[in-house]
Amino acid sequence: MFWADKLLGDVTGKQVINDSWTPSGMVHMGSLKGPVIHDTLYRILKEKGIDVTFLYGFDDADPIDGLPSELQKSHSQYLGMPLFKAPSPDENGSFGDYFGNKMKALLDELEIKPDRLYKTSELYKNGTFNKAISFVLDHVQEIRKVYENMYKKTIPQTWYPLQVICPNCGKLGTTKVIGWNGEDVTFNCELNLVKWAQGCGNTGILNPLDGNSKMPWKVEWAAKWWTFGVTIESAGKDHGSAGGSYDVAMNIVKDVFKAKPPLKLVYEFFLSGGKKMSSSKGLGLTGEELLELMPPQVVRFFMTWTKPSIATEFDPNNPSSIYKIFDLYFWSGQDAKIDKEEIKNVPIVKAYNFAQIDNVEKVLPIRFIDLVSLMQMPNRKDEIREKRLEEWVPYAEKWLEKFAPESDKFIVRKQIPEQVKSLSENQKQFLKKISGELDKEWDAEELQTELYEWAKEINISSKDAFAAIYIALIGKDHGPKAAWLILSLDKEFVKKRFEEVSSSVILNSFQNLNEMPKLVRHDK
């Protein structure tokens, strides 16, 4: 059973799905997993005819507690301020808007269309959170108890689940509420409350409603569920581990707000070389980079075909990693064409179908590994057009340009490669046989079959036979389908190359590496 069907199996009645993201920096590819998962659940519920609303928020009321290296100089003065109050790096809107707009663009590309997009800052400013703020302050003792039970430590009676925006310096992360009289809070803006920002030392009294304050995000999380009636919201493993932030919010909504917690789902990280992807450590891609490497449908499929609880290994520099994803998409697409109910309910086929966007299936006509090979062959534009591969070519080009190892790049050499000196006499004889047969009109499939037959006649293994072709043409012992490679090139060029390589005179003419001709692309 598809993981989403199993999760939603007993769901009835009106549902509210919520997800949110803090727009404080680049959109790492892992940041897209939550939106894709929630949107998949949304699509399934809608397909079942269940009344469902999907909310997606930008938590731009959070304080700035760190900066990308390129913004250290220009924005360090805003550390501690809410994201919505600091200026955008491009001077267009707020700091939160700058990064939030990047996420919005990616959601659009993935065709994730929530019923409502919101900014958390607006929930505070327009009074949506006023009731929740008063409630948590009035029930501070119960919230302290939740924290004490979860963290097994005493919470001071002076701690309140709220921070205010200092009216003197505009900072949020440096303030501490120390009293509540039912209408106003007393606060300090402390010089050294946190390491990443400095307060101004101001002390005062103010009304916390209508955008003057912010709840700690664990309390705020529970307040969102209570305010919106959220029934489904998942969380990443960093928040969702036992006793973590997710559980704290769950207990607050249950024990303090006396509301039913949302359906729980914890999703795992993406891994690179067994390690969690991290933008600060240079592991993984940004969302923009991922969508340059894969079309939206493949990205959605990649993020949902396995159970969310399973960590997914992804390394674009590893050919087997990228080929596996596209292969799974390709073969699932083939299965999806079979009009049988038992096939339609296969989990990976369901993931494929729910990954499609624009109401148009994005079919991958051939395996990605074959596309990578095909587009590196000269004179194949007509075949690419005939097979309707044009829209897939940019993704293969991007992978070859930025990530593919040299072993997967096939460049036809204008001059005879140095590696031909390793060929055996049988391999040379095999090339000579091919050269003598090229004047005939060949179909690629027929020629491929004959290549195997000629190898048998000469008593050479197919592995060694095909290695001879590749070495002679591209200087490597592996490459794209041999017959297709041969027929993509000028016939006279291939005949001459194979004749020369099979000649001992030519092979022995290379005295040392310094005498080797310069290797360049054949198609230049």
Image (cartoon, rainbow, N blue to C red):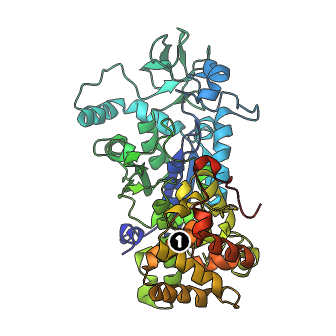
Q: Residue at x 54, y 32 (%)?
A: 62
Q: Residue at x 56, y 30 (%)?
A: 209
Q: Is residue 242 left or right of residue 85?
A: left
**Location of residue 265 in the rendering, given as x and y in whole percent from the top left corner:** 38, 56
Q: Which residue is nearer to you in this view: 487 or 214?
A: 487
Compared to 409, does 182 lie above or below?
above
**Location of residue 203 in the rendering, given as x and y in whole percent from the top left corner:** 52, 10
Q: How many marks?
A: 1
Mark 1 secondary-structure assignment: helix
**Location of residue 296 in the rendering, given as x and y in whole percent from the top left corner:** 61, 63
Q: Residue at x 60, y 57 (%)?
A: 399
Q: Which residue is nearer to you in this view: 399 or 504?
A: 504
**Location of residue 222 in the rendering, given as x and y in whole percent from the top left corner:** 42, 44
Q: Which residue is nearer to you in this view: 334 or 368?
A: 368
The residue carrying pointer 1 sits among few (fewer than 14), some (14 to 19) or many (20 or more) residues within 10 Å by Cα, namely many
Question: Where is mark 1, residue-wise?
Answer: 468
Q: Is residue 279 left or right of residue 261?
A: right
Q: Residue at x 64, y 50 (%)?
A: 515
Q: Residue furthest top?
A: 201
Q: Amino acid at mark 1?
A: Ala
Assign the C terminus to one quadrant of the image: bottom right
